[in-house]
Amino acid sequence: MRKYALVACVAACGCAPPNRPVVVAAEACRGGPAALWLDFEGAGVVHANGDDAAAMPVTSVLAATSAVIPPFDSTVSAPAVTRSQAIDAVVDRVRTLFLPFDVRVSTTRPVAAPYTRILVGGMASALGVTATEAGLARLDCGNATDGDVAYVFAGELTPDYGGVVGVANVAAHEAGHAFGLEHVTAATDVMYAVASPSLTLPELFGLSFGSGSYSSYGAGTRLCSGGDPIDEAAALACNVGLRAGGGDVTSPSLTWNPPASDVATRFRVAFDASDDVGVVRVEVYKNLELIASLDAPPYEADISATPSEHFYVTVEAIDAAANRAVETRIFTAASAPTGGSDGGVAPAGDLAVSDPVPSGRSGGCSIAPPGNAVAHPGETSWPGVMLALACAVAAVRARRRSSGSG
């Protein structure tokens, strides 16, 4: 499988031994639990000098003036399934990403403050900002400030630009900023952000909070960490706490036997899924589009393709605790009804590079240091539909706005 990866070290130059991870004294840790509200229903927002997730309307440093963030429109990100199925897919992926940590994810207003609120819906223009980005958040070092407000502009994230996988990855990325995490250069990290990102599609289904070197991309000055590598898992454990021991920690079992050669332009796939507690849902994706959400057996889905199309099918089995099993396969649709022998060939460039991005489409992630409403300047071109992770998602052109205070 081809992969266009960033090279941190080359043989000709070698690599110096990394510095020890930054360690935060336990007495400085805030701990948890941390409440994270993924708000899909829209809200009024007004600019203020500080965030207040509980206010009505919401007060936000990042809002230019007064604005209305519209509800999440699932027909943009996941047109083949219902709105509730699309929301479930987003929420459970965010839950999976935060499984090791004491983060309580909800889709309704928590009973009591404090909580972090992420408004999921619309485009950046709805917030009154001039650039179009996949998400915005204020960097809250140490998770020291209550009531952070962040944004995921799901209206930018069609299936070609991340779909619900992208919406979830961006939501986790922006929550990471609200919990005190900076950008890193590790490609499969949730907080990955560099000028020329490169990921394969299967990697987008397997991100995590790990460790990596600091990336100044989209932020400029290092504010929260003191050296490399940044141990993000340790930082989250400090800032939001670790998940309590016990409970269900076993991932479901998932098996399927896909065709070994070319497939028809319409074919059916069937899966077996089981779990020690119970499978809540099986999700089926063609590339990054959620095409089926199955809550009971038989786990089957019909897939359509154009003649000679190379594409991925990813299947995920999810249990009630958000443990999941993931399987990805590569397919080639036959150019004629009789099929052929070139099945299993990876899509061109492993989908890491595609045709030029259509004009007018953009995305990305900007973070604002405490007290600043906008991020540092910069611009990049995101190559291809694979990079649904523009600062965690959106394989598109990202514009960074100038910071009012530098």
Image: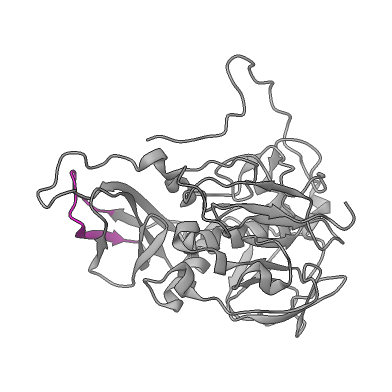
Question: Which residue is at the far bottom?
Answer: 56
- Name the residue nearer the viewer: 49 or 404: 404
Residue drawn at the location 79% of the way across and 45% of the way down: 220
Residue drawn at the location 73% of the way across and 72% of the way down: 128
Residue 332 at x, y = what percent? 25, 47
Question: Which residue is at the far top?
Answer: 12
400 is higher (above) or lower (below) than 69: above
Q: Is residue 338 visible?
A: yes
Residue drawn at the location 52% of the way across and 68% of the way down: 91
Q: How many marks?
A: 0
Q: Is residue 52 magenta?
A: no
Is residue 197 toward the left or the right of residue 321 in the image?
A: right
Residue 246 at x, y = what percent? 53, 60
Question: Which residue is at the far right?
Answer: 405
Snapshot quadrant of residue 268: bottom left
- The N terminus - image quarter: top left
Segment tinted magenta in the rendering: 255-275
- Name the residue nearer the viewer: 71 or 102: 71
Residue 369 at x, y = what percent? 82, 56
Q: Is residue 278 visible?
A: no
Is residue 402 toward the left or the right of residue 230 in the image?
A: right
Snapshot quadrant of residue 197: top right
Q: Is residue 268 magenta?
A: yes
14 is higher (above) or lower (below) than 153: above
160 is higher (above) or lower (below) than 5: below
